[in-house]
Amino acid sequence: MSESIDVTGRLRKMPAEAGDPVAYNLAIGDNRITLNDLIGHKVRLNFDGVIRCIHCDRTTKKSFNQGYCYPCFRKLAACDSCIMSPEKCHYHLGTCREPEWGEANCMVEHVVYLANSSGLKVGITRATQVPTRWIDQGAVTAIPMLRVASRYLSGLVEVACKNHVADRTNWRAMLKGDVPELDLVQERERLLDLIADDLAQLRAQHGEESIRIVDEATLGLGYPVQVWPAKVKTHNLDKTPEVEGLLEGIKGQYLMLDTGVINIRKFTGYEVRFRVLD
């Protein structure tokens, strides 16, 4: 390396930009480290035992919902159960924990999409989160299927889709690069036919313009991976506060080391020291 890297701070989800391959940064405190350049180099990550809430900065013994203290977990709309199950969104009932947050994040256009991370899956995300959401899931291809008026409605559409296609990623297969080739345009047409009656019912209840079929192209994504792991072993900073190894790749929110993989997003809010050892 032309210069040594040794930084300390609170860990955040890795920012990433679509490219060939996806360009990753490691966010530690105010530092942004270009990770793609570090592939092939030995790195070390040390957790100092301190976790700080990413919302209020309170010290917490345990991280909830990827970076929050328990009071924030209980209080914030971003931590409500409807975030994981959007069909349970209750903004329209007047019971949202933070109505202004709901207006900005839930009562906006969402995309129902198909992605290939470890096989075909359906998912939803805010329109502004395309393609970030796909990158975070390690998708090699993804395609928008529908654009809908709100998070709640996207959740209802996703429920209809789940009768015909999975909504989960097999993260171990994703990290092994064990991903079948799929024609997402063809899969989109097939699924739209299967849920046509469901869509008609939802439009009747919420308005014709609330759900729009889109004819957008498939996006392909490549990742900076030098060596795919034959067997996926995970590092856990709570159990082993020092993680060291040769950085062999990055995919989704995982660093892939020759000693195992680590999900950076899982340890959001952890105070760490990151060093390049060669």
Image (cartoon, rainbow, N blue to C red):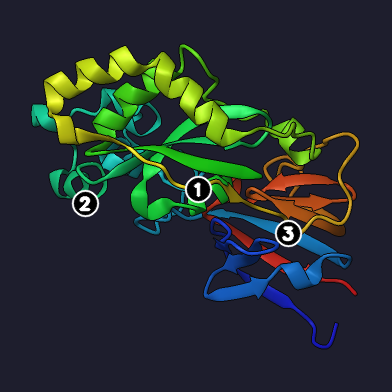
Say which quadrant the N terminus sits in.
bottom right
Callouts 2 and 1 close, C-beta under 8 Å: no
Q: Is residue 166 left or right of residue 263?
A: left
Residue drawn 46% across the image and 17% down it? 162
Distance (Cα) linking label 2 and label 1: 27 Å
Res. 217 mark: 1
Q: Is residue 32 left or right of residue 199?
A: right
**Position in image of residue 221 (x %, y %):** 64, 52
Q: Secondary structure at mark 2?
A: helix
Q: Amino acid at mark 3?
A: Asn
- Judging by the rendered image, the residue that carries numbered circle 2 is 104
- Judging by the rendered image, the residue that carries numbered circle 3 is 46
Q: Nearer the viewer, mark 2 or mark 1?
A: 1
Toward which corner of the image does residue 27 lie, by quadrant?
A: bottom right
Q: Secondary structure at mark 1?
A: loop
Q: Earlier in the sequence, mark 2 or mark 3?
A: 3
Residue drawn 33% across the image and 44% down it? 72
Toward which corner of the image does residue 112 lie, by quadrant?
A: top left
Q: Earlier in the sequence, mark 1 or mark 3?
A: 3
Q: Amino acid at mark 1?
A: Ala
Relative height, residue 276 to residue 87 (above, below): below
Q: Amino acid at mark 2?
A: Ala
Report the front residue among 238 and 133.
133
Q: Nearer the viewer, mark 1 or mark 3?
A: 1
